[in-house]
Amino acid sequence: MEPDKFRESRQAINRLCKGIDLLIEQKELEASTEGHIEVSSRLDVLKPQAEGEIQERSVKNLGIKIRGLSTLISKLKPKKKQAIKKEAKIAIAWDEERLGQLSTAFLKKVFMNMGDDTKARVCFGTTGKGIRPSYQIEFGNQETTAFTGSGHKPQAKPILPGTKKISQPFSHEVIDSILHGK
């Protein structure tokens, strides 16, 4: 190949390599991969046209440079996709109808935990699926005990009334009437 044309092709490949190097520094995986494909194809076109020892050595050196870029590109990680925002969970609205949908076995255990205290009131948790909600009982003597919904075991601390995580209170009488209605 004519030396001037070869030099122009070689310099164009070198400029592309510098551009790819910058893309690698910016951690642009896709753009640097596309650039690598472009520069590799240009080198493949230039290889068979190289004449003489100097041009062949120059092509060999460009090949080494391009393989080095390939190694650097392979170490790049793809950019993380933006996380899909989760929809806000809707709090469970507890009313007598919804309480009636709870299993009889669950309500019996709640009623047992309320004991014989007719002034006791129970509040249910508004998070989760509403199948076995956590709950807390406020007894007639103003003591409050929270329970797990799955095992009906006492919890360390109750949920503060007035927060969105707990329902309005239901009386001992309401729970009793729902149980006797089933």
Image (cartoon, rainbow, N blue to C red):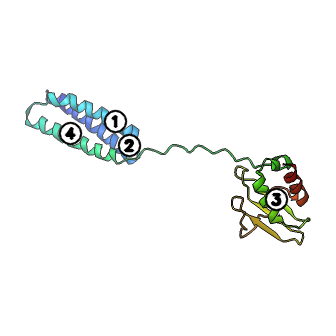
Kind of residue sitting beneath label 4: Gly
Q: Nearer the viewer, mark 3 or mark 4?
A: 3
Kind of residue sitting beneath label 1: Gly
Kindly state the secondary structure of the residue where label 3 is placed: strand
Tell me which corner region of the image, top left, top right, bottom left or bottom right, holds residue 66: top left
Left or right placement of residue 57 versus residue 127 in this view: left
Which dot marks residue 23?
A: 2
Kind of residue sitting beneath label 3: Cys
Kind of residue sitting beneath label 2: Leu
Which dot marks residue 63?
A: 4
Real-space Cα separation, disc 4 to disc 1, in angstroms? 14 Å
Picture coordinates of residue 177, whole percent (x, y):
89, 53
Q: Give the camera-side residue of 5 and 41.
A: 41
Which dot marks residue 16?
A: none
Q: Which residue is mark 1?
A: 35
Q: Nearer the viewer, mark 3 or mark 1?
A: 3
Picture coordinates of residue 154, whole percent (x, y):
73, 68
- Which of the two discs, 3 and 1, labels the residue nearer the N terminus? 1
Real-space Cα separation, disc 4 to disc 2, in angstroms? 19 Å
156 up-or-down from 172: above or below:
below
State if disc 4 and disc 3 touch (CB < 8 Å). no
Residue at point 73%, 55% (across, down): 133
| Quadrant of the rendering where the N terminus is positioned | top left
State if disc 2 and disc 1 touch (CB < 8 Å). yes
State if disc 1 and disc 4 touch (CB < 8 Å). no
Q: Which residue is mark 3?
A: 123
